[in-house]
Image: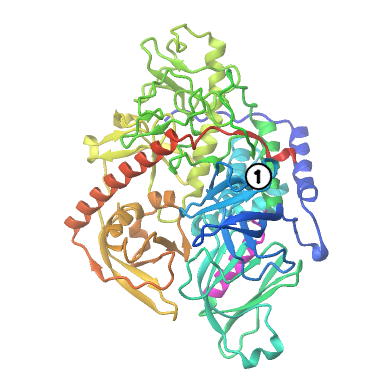
Amino acid sequence: MTDAIPQINISQAKMDALARDLQKLEMDSTTVVGGGQLVPAFQRQGYLEKMGHTRTKWFRRFFVLRDSFLLSYNLQKSDYTVEPRTCINLSSSQFQLLPEADKLEVFSITTMERDQFFLGAQSSSERDAWIKDMEVARTITHANMVKLAVENQCLAEEKGLGGVTRDNSTSALSIFCNNEYIRNTPLTGGAEGWLRTLGFNPDFQAAGKKKLKKCYFMLRDSHLLMFNGGDILTKPRGVMYLVGTTTEKVEDEEGMFKFACRSKQCGDVIELVASSNKQRQRWIQALQVGARVTYPDFKLLLKEHQLLAAVTMTPRAAPPTAPNQPAIKVDAPPVPLMTDDMDVQGQQLDPATQQAYDSEGVPLVRDPEGKLVHGDGSACESTEDRYNAEGQQLDPFNRPLPPGAVPMFTADGQAIGVGPDGKHYLPNGDDVTDQAHFAADGTELKSEVVEAAGAIATDVSVALKARAMLKGEGATEEMVDMLGRTFRAMEGEGEGTVLKNADGQEVPLKSSRKVEQDGKLVDYDYSAPKPVESGELTIMMEQEEGDEVELGTVEVDSYTTLKDLRNTLTVVLESELPNFVFLVNMIPLLKHEEDDKLAFSLMPCVFVRSNELKVEAPKMKFTKKVEKMVAAEQKAKAEANEFEDIMAKIRAGKFLKPVKDSIMDE
């Protein structure tokens, strides 16, 4: 293993200045109201026209945008805990401009769950303002708060500033960068499950005469959603905004595990009854964290990142050309962050890489084999210019080029990249640090240009450490090549193992390294293969009455991921349990977390939930042979369908590259 990058020597004066800036951040970035609680104003509110889902006509609705949620009501309300007409979680949503209709400037919102909403504004400026604010809102999620806090801590530690940030950093970083919390909490965060309640803002004096009702609650980011049994999960019966709330245990009565959430901002309150003390404690912690998944706290973490970057990292270079730009400018973080770790195909990007676009602003995507292609399906050569969403040029491995650097190649046109150790490698792992480097046109590069490319090593190292920290308990071991990219596939065992890199190319074993939990890279040892364990995993569902119902069992081994398990279950459950999600600690997993989570670590059972609460599902059981056959067929079919779908959207012009302003300019 090569030597680690030496720490930058930061003067004590700079460290003291950073400490003062960190301490000052929280006071400057939030609004403090009665009780000292952090309560931001709504990002936006006002009237829009909404196309009905069942009746194709426009309905005037009052919309409220706060953190990652967009809610609509019949009229402007002062009490926003009443039942909303529409509740849209903007996380990972996409926005599209549509032709004018009925004298309205129309746009659509497509959510991560594939729900689609059509909205109309009275003018193009009003429409653009809504989209601009929603582009910001879609980033204010628990997942992004955790990713950003972890990246900040890793960035600080990489340059010897870990102690300064730990002693002086904001409370937001300490909440979302707690190692124990990260290990036990999926990135989605929050909680969900059946609880008993009298509802929002009940008449407590008459409470003794009322019967507690069992409702399904979902905590998403800064909102608590309540559903009646059987409701579709996009139509809550009530919503509580958690910013400025306090959550605490209520004295038990007759064995009931009670707790209450109260808002000092608007006087809202809800008392809840859990089925056990463990469930109550889990909900109390989740509600307390949810109260910090806010717009001000997100900006706080972004400013903290800027301070650390200013001390430890070199500013990004300007793009050499100006790719096409759409009509709307949207806000986004001013520096590349792990919060941008998904490509337009919905797949997790490699550490330190970004979604690539060609010079016309059209995204480059990967086919099912991993090869990068244009929107027309033609191959993208490594020597072609490519850019990120901000117009910065990328290297041949889709990483932003540092100032003064250019894409590097061998004399015969093979791409050269910088690894996390600062050395230069080919995709197959060959070290070419001491060999001549050439530009795309074949011109030999000067030494200062080659040296400038080394600045990216810090970015890759930080990204690898942050990715390792974000993996929870029971995750697969991360394998990367010498450039820090994850492998697409591994076949065989021992010395006969064949690896495929991010581009689908076969590479030798020497190109692999293992990323440990602390982010260190070590040689992967194939000489002593681990024994394979196997067992039957029970698939469970919690019913409205609180009963835990067994749906069936599936045989898994110590290498089966939840993604493998999904491929198996989808064939049987697609009609009875559509769009199901896995719940870990009663928190739904993101799709890319399923790639990392080992099903065997969840033995003896894992819970699932569909978008429809009241669902009966069949008993099921698979033999190992059938399981593997079904999983392989399902995976190939899903990959082919997803690729064709994304290519159709690109050809329709739905993924033009945005021009991003800084979120901090507001």
Q: Quadrant of the C terminus?
A: top right
Image x and y of residue 349, in percent: 46, 38
The residue under the point 48% across, 45% down is: 468
Look at the numbered disc 1 and give the secondary structure of its residue: helix
Q: Residue furthest bottom?
A: 209
Q: Nearer the viewer, residue 95 or 542?
A: 95
| Residue 526, visible in the rendered structure | no
Q: Is residue 578 magenta?
A: no
The residue at which mark 1 appears reads as 127
Give the tally of numbered discs: 1
Give me the residue at 45% from left, 23% from top.
396
Residue 454 falls in image quadrant = top right
Residue span colored magenta = 279-294
| Residue type at tag 1 | Arg
Q: Looking at this view, name the residue that lies furthest to the front.
A: 102
Relative to 242, is 213 above or below? below
**Residue 434 vertical placement versus 261 (above, below):** above
* Residue located at (57% from left, 48% from top): 144
User: Which quarter of the figure is the N terminus placed in?
Assistant: top left
Magenta stretch contains residue 291: yes
